[in-house]
Amino acid sequence: MAHSPQATDGLASIPALLQRNATKFGDKPAYREKEFGIWQSWSWAETEKEIEALALGLLNLGVNEGDFIAIIGRNRPYFYWSMVAAQSVGAVPVPVYQDSASEEMAYVLDHCGARFAIVEDQEQVDKVIDIQDRLHQFEHMIYVDKRGLRKYDHHKLHVFADVQEQGRAAYWELIDDLKARRDKLTYDSTCVMLYTSGTTGRPKGVVLSNRNIIEASRSSAEFDRLGQGEEVLAYLPMAWVGDFIFSIGQAYWCGFCVNCPESADTMMTDLREIGPTYYFAPPRVFETQLTTVMIRMEDAGRFKKWLFDRAMAHAKKVGPSILDGKSVSFMDRIKYALGNIFIYGPLKNTLGLSRVRVGYTAGEAIGPEIFDFYRSLGINLKQLYGQTEASVFITLQPDGEVRSDTVGVAAPGVEIRIADNGEVFYRGPGTFEEYYKNPESTADTKDPEGWVATGDAGFFDPENGHLRIIDRAKDVGKMANGALFAPKYVENKLKFFPNILETVVFGNGREECTAFINIDLTAVGNWAERNNIGYASYQELAGHPRVLETIRGHVEDVNRSLAEDPMLSACQVHRFLVLHKELDADDGELTRTRKVRRRIIEEKYDDLLGALYDGSKEISTITEVTYEDGRKGSISATLQIMDAAVVPVEAQKVAAE
């Protein structure tokens, strides 16, 4: 079995790392937040005092060891402090997706038995009040933003700053209790409980110990030589394991600064101002940034566009090799250096990625073309493969060995094996303790020797020993003729095109592959404006004949690419339709981390799926939708079903021979 490391230097918990950082990096910035257009900053010494005051305030409110405290809000220092304050008093922080509907929130708070919640504003307070009658153990709520809450009943409702003040006032009364609880924490104490996104069912509470978080943070920081001088931007959902590792685990291990943007709307501006050195984004963020670049280039003059295309073609040819320190001719280096002065450098600056030393993407596979685009600019973008249950890291890509079609080698201390059916298993120091109150699922996922079933299908590349993930094991199937069916691979190729936001490919057990497609309203809307095409809604634009023809062109481009891959050539898309609405987490079609719920979509749109396979040219449908305020409604539409040209595989084989 994998070794079980012990705490080093007595640093057995996140609060212990906070004490060390307050002493060692006292005057260095720990947190920044932009508010009202101005960056506020807290040093490690100031952060330690803020967290201590809150922890004392929580003791004053009656928080017991082992209590669960829900944390609901966007990325703000107050909520990171709340998580560490909860740990300091022996409680367990449970970050919750802030955009969760009341029903989802009720399930999480009831399942973990939260006695307390620390929330951001009136919206979150109202959500918790709405579900309070179902939460029999719930007692107190603390909120940060006072706006709109003055006339609420404050018997069980408290202002964040007031709780801190009460903690400071009771300092001498409670400080010994706080120190005693903090000193009790060990490597085996629970550090955090994070809920899975629930792609296939109810979310599960993943219990992660201090050992899991600190060991995963330490080994990954050493792997990429992260230090105290890094700057990160905290903008991903706080309920997601990636944000917890980057903004708490690694930040506290290394002592670097976590920067919180003013809002989701100002994120790109704030990203440019901070210029992070260490950056993580899921594929969707990189896709959106690339779409923005392509839209701007479409609006540029003919000469500028020609210059951009020429420069990018050269960057694609030599950029990744220069980044990896490989041999490139002197003339190619000169041309690349000129391109960097006039094109790549300004573009990286616009994207806010000029200073990135290490960039990562994960969550799902990124399209190879998108991945190569960023690396060709000289951005050290790498892929990692991870899970909540692994404290993120299962594999990492070493510098100089980065490829778009693999996810790298086993992370330090992690062992990986591939089962006979192709499923990937791993074990290591980051392996979760259990699913809370769910021994059956724990036993199904983690065996007595600590091996965890990922649910993903993959294999080791025989050339370099790197792991290659094909798809979710349950989604990988066979076409009717026995050929491999891997929908995610095809979907990622389609999403490379800026006009395509989301796609769901079908074909398991069938003669042919088909697809549902969502257009990207920003990219296609920009094209419509340039071509003087008026439209009143997403639905109207999605059904426009010229839009459908453009999407057909993209599908056929992907088909030609797939035809060249003998393993996946049968996955070419024969027919598709552009959906009349965007897939939405509020409608249950996506998880809160924007992953497609394939089975739910199949059931919900079974009439559309049937039409793709029965030869129909169009189909009329009515779909229930959920509005932002929670009201239900319905939209009706008549959708055109489009045929796409495919490359006959037999002809391809003959041509190859």
Image (cartoon, rainbow, N blue to C red):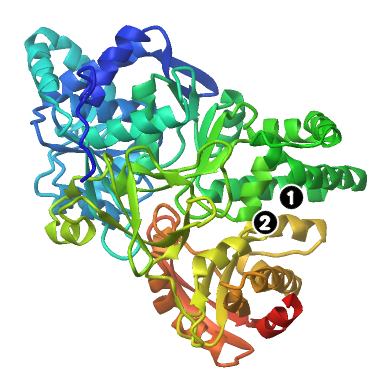
Amino acid carrying mark 2 in the image: Pro
Mark 2 Cα-neighbour bin, 10 Å: few <14, some 14–19, many ≥20:
many
Q: Foreground: 411 or 376?
A: 411
Which residue matches tag 2? 498
Mark 1 Cα-neighbour bin, 10 Å: few <14, some 14–19, many ≥20:
some
Q: Foreground: 558 or 554?
A: 558
Which residue matches tag 1? 295
Q: Is residue 406 above or below residue 174?
A: below
List x then y, in percent, for residue 12.
20, 24
**CB atoms of marks 1 and 2 within 8 Å:** yes
Circle 1 SS class? helix
Circle 2 SS class? loop
Which residue appears at 67% of the width and 70% of the height?
A: 564
Amino acid carrying mark 1 in the image: Ile
Which residue appears at 74% of the width and 50% of the height?
A: 295
Ranked by sequence position, the earlier of labels 1 and 2 is 1
* Quadrant in the picture for residue 420: bottom left
